[in-house]
Amino acid sequence: MKNGDLPPLAVNTRRLSAFVMLFVLLVPLGLPTAVAWQEDGWLTQEVVGGERLELGDEFGCHGIPGVNTLDNLKEVVGECKEYLTDRIDASKWGSNPLSFGLPSEEISDAHGLELFESGFRVVGDQIEGDPNYVNKVERNGGSLEKNVADEDLIQSVASHGGLVSMYWEARIEDLNVRRDKDVVEWIEDQSVWYTTWGEYHSYLNGGELNTTDSDGNLEISISSGLGYWPVPLTLRIDLGNVSIQKIIDENGMELELMGSEEGHLRSGWRVENSYLIISVSPDLVTTIYTEGETDWSDVTIIENQPLFNNHTWAIAVAGHHTTDLFEWSEPFQYSSLRFTWLVEPKADIEPSWILPMVAIVIILVAPTAIWWTLKKDREMQNYSDDEE
């Protein structure tokens, strides 16, 4: 029977029933989703988190699920920093996190100041602008992903010196990403400083150098940079004909010799041609003892520090959106590479009483609405029969 053949009451009844059913079906779609954290237990485990920390990896922040970082920067920085520091130190050099991964958008001085005041000193790695207060890292070395990693690009950037920054993400939505083993092995064969964002910029922002001639021996002290980690710094000293006997820090510990291929930051020394390449820990007086008395006023100390161990370039890998440290780090368990793990909690749907209540309403309302509609249809049918 067409609506045009029915009286107005019947037509309104059918329309009301249709609206009720539509409301019941659409209500769940309009409910807000509650996003909670699912914590990464590997951060607190010695077998993964502790091992990566001891190797020299860095732990930084990459945001909070479901919250726009730049629109809510103060909130996101505070929550992500708390999530991280409650579970693991940022580095073996210091517990305070220095690095923050930001989205590929324009970053203002106000953003930089907010991060600086929260203790962060490094941001990256595809941001626009050049904000004050923080150091900007460019993603200039590409990815470690198989069929995406580019050895020629890495070589090109490395030829200019400084930091080559790459990125790695083990999972993108439901896709497992594989590393490019050939490129990784090539990198590991290079004479390079394997570092992290925070370590590299702590090195570049090291404090003031002081030297003192003490009875023919040279005392060296370097202060650490304000707000940065106290990492060893490398000096290059033109010895001329001076011969080194030993080098000892103020704790009586003798600095170890290191080879020219040493690629992981530490204190130590070596002689290359007539140059002393020495990496000293900050805030400690280190004394260089020589064979016979030396007039250190005739010795040139190059204060414009080279990179660690006199390397010409350094490489760091940023682990983007690290929600599962084991999954992200497992392919590099025995690698020379060092990572800045930009950590964020994994998004989780928080249980809510709203959805069960909606389900109960649907269970109760749907049969009732159907029964009421059929009842009205029968009444209208009987009414039509009586009219005839």
Image: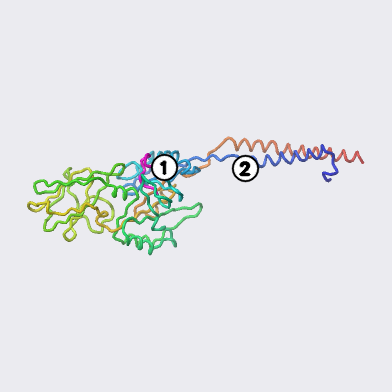
Could you give the CA–CA distance between mark 2 and mark 1, rounded to whole angstroms? 38 Å
Q: Mark 2 points at which residue?
A: 29
- Determine contact: label 2, label 1, CB under 8 Å: no
Q: In this view, does 199 lie to the left or right of 362?
A: left
Question: Does the segment drawn in magenta span residue 329?
Answer: no
Q: Can residue 336 be seen in this view?
A: no
Image quarter for residue 151? bottom left
**Range drawn in magenta:** 109-123
The residue mark sitting in front, 2 or 1, is 1
Q: Which mark is residue 361?
A: none
Pinpoint residue 63: horizontal percent, then vertical percent: 44, 44
Pinpoint residue 328: horizontal percent, then vertical percent: 42, 51
Residue at 21% across / 47% down in the picture? 209
Q: Residues within 10 Å of mark 2 (few under 14, many from 20)?
A: few
Pinpoint residue 174: horizontal percent, then vertical percent: 51, 52
Looking at the picture, tell me which residue is in the foreground, 80 or 375. 80
Q: Mark 1 points at which residue?
A: 110
Q: Is residue 348 visible?
A: yes
Q: In this view, does 192 lie to the left or right of 384?
A: left
- Amino acid carrying mark 1 in the image: Ala
Q: What number of labels is visible?
A: 2
Pinpoint residue 103: horizontal percent, then vertical percent: 45, 49
Badge 2 marks a residue whose secondary structure is helix
